Each structure stands twice: as structure tokens, then as C-alpha cells.
Image (cartoon, rainbow, N blue to C red):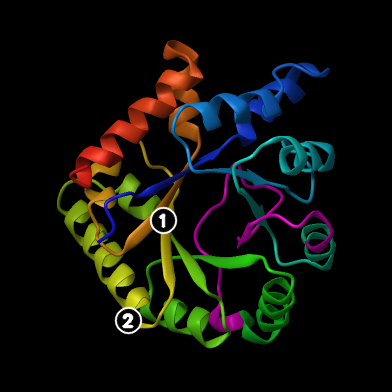
Amino acid sequence: MTAHLRLGVNIDHVATLRNARGGTEPDPIRAARVVAESGADSITAHLREDRRHINDSDMARLKAEIALPLNMEMAATDEMVAIALDLGPAHVCVVPEHREELTTEGGLDVVGSMDHLWPLVSQMTDAGIQVAMFIDPDPAQIAASAEIGAPAIELHTGEYCNATDDHVTHQLARLVDGAAQAQSLGLQCHAGHGLDLENVKLVAAIPQLVELNIGHAILAGAVFDGLGLSVRAMRAVMDLARGV
């Protein structure tokens, strides 16, 4: 287990707030600067088909103006592939996307989409972009991700975060087993979705994980405590779980 668990901060909903009123404030690039100064290791942003929050200009500015690696969440569409290849983020995370959803719901079906996803992985890899598949902690999906040549996966932690009582233990066990399987297949293992200052503790302690991507909880905390303090609080909880 590496002591330092990377923290990627998703800034999408800074743009959501900006778009609710129109104009330019709050500026997600300013938010990314604060995040970078407060202990994050990367910036995550999801460029959706409908551009409901982050837009193309935001992505270009994030790449040009922020020193931290940019992790672009994207659907597996020709449009997004072309944008990613032109933009050149450090990482892309391929996610399922449905126009009517409030946020990403569930993991990508790699098993049922291998023929479609394999060329995407190949193109990104050839361009020097690390690709992760956002998947549920399902053994078949993890194995399929390795089979198509993806160097990384991001385990969907939503079911764990939403679980109650005895189901928490079961869902955590799925994440633990999934991370171990990923490592055995040579996959770099990330995790994210729904994590907050409480439920992140057990996930951050999973030794095979190298990165967590967290957005909503950090920005929710920022409403009351400020963005920098909210990032530092999450960083501190993750470090404690790793014994740093």
C-alpha cells in the first residue's frame, strides 16, 4: 500500500452554480486554483453531452491554466473522443451517461461494450492519455476492463455510500475484493461517487486504491467552511486512514 492516496477533486458543480444565474461567477477555474493550493492531486471535470455544468471553454482553461493533472470524465461517444484527443488531458475516465440523470448512476457496462470501447482505449493510450473505466465492483466488469487494455479502473462507490446497516459490510467487501482483483490484473485502481468525510474512511484504507475522486461532498462543505478548508478536511481524513 502506498501511503499517499491521491485526491482528485471534481469541480463540476461550481459551474452548475454559475450556470444557474448565467454570467461568469463563480469561476470553476478559480475554484481549481484553490483546490490545487489546498492539497488535491488532480482536477476532475465531466464534460457532458448537454454541457449542463462544465463547458468546452472551461476544459480548455483548466488544461492551460492549472498545473495539476486534468482528469476528464466523458461518455464513450465520437464527439467526446475527438474533444479529448484535441484537449490532451492527463487522464480520461469513461462513464455511462444518460441525459435525464441528475448524476452518474451506476457503472459502465464494459462487458457488453468491449468492441466499442477497445478502439477508444487504444486511441487514448496512443495519445499518451491514461484511460480509466468507471465500473461497479463486479468481477466480470473488472476483467473486461483489463481485456480491452484499459490501464486503470474507477470503482463506483455509490452502492456502498447509499447502503444501510448490514449492507454496508457487504458493499465494502465488494470494493475490497474489486480492488484486489484489479491489482492482480495489473490495473491501477481508483474509486469515487458519493464519498464524504465519514464514509470515505473505510474506502481510503483499502490498500490497493491509489486515487479517490470526490466532488459533491467537498463543494457542499465549502458552502459553510470555504473551499480550501473543505479540501484540506478531506485530505486529512484520507491521510489518517492511510496512517500518514
Q: Describe residue 229's horizontal placement relative to residue 166 as left or right.
A: right
Please tell me how crowded label 2 is: few (under 14), some (14-19), or many (20+) other residues with Cα within 10 Å. Answer: few
Q: Neighbour class for label 1 at 10 Å: few (<14), some, many (≥20)?
A: many
Extent of the magenta region = 85-112
Check disc 1 and give the amino acid type: Ala
Residue 224 sits above or below residue 164 on the image: above
Tell me which secondary structure the magenta stretch mostly adopts.
Answer: loop
Residue 198 in view (yes/no):
no
Q: Quadrant of the N terminus?
A: bottom left
Residue depicted at x 68% and y 47%: 100
Q: Quadrant of residue 206?
A: bottom left
Q: Is residue 26 above or below residue 150?
A: above
Along the line of sight, which residue is nearer the eye, 100 or 19?
Answer: 19
Residue 89 image offset from top left, x and y in percent:
70, 54
Q: Determine which residue is flagged by label 1.
A: 191
Point out which mark residue 184 bears: 2
- Asked whether residue 158 is in view, the answer is yes
Magenta-colored stretch includes residue 18: no
Q: Secondary structure at mark 2?
A: helix
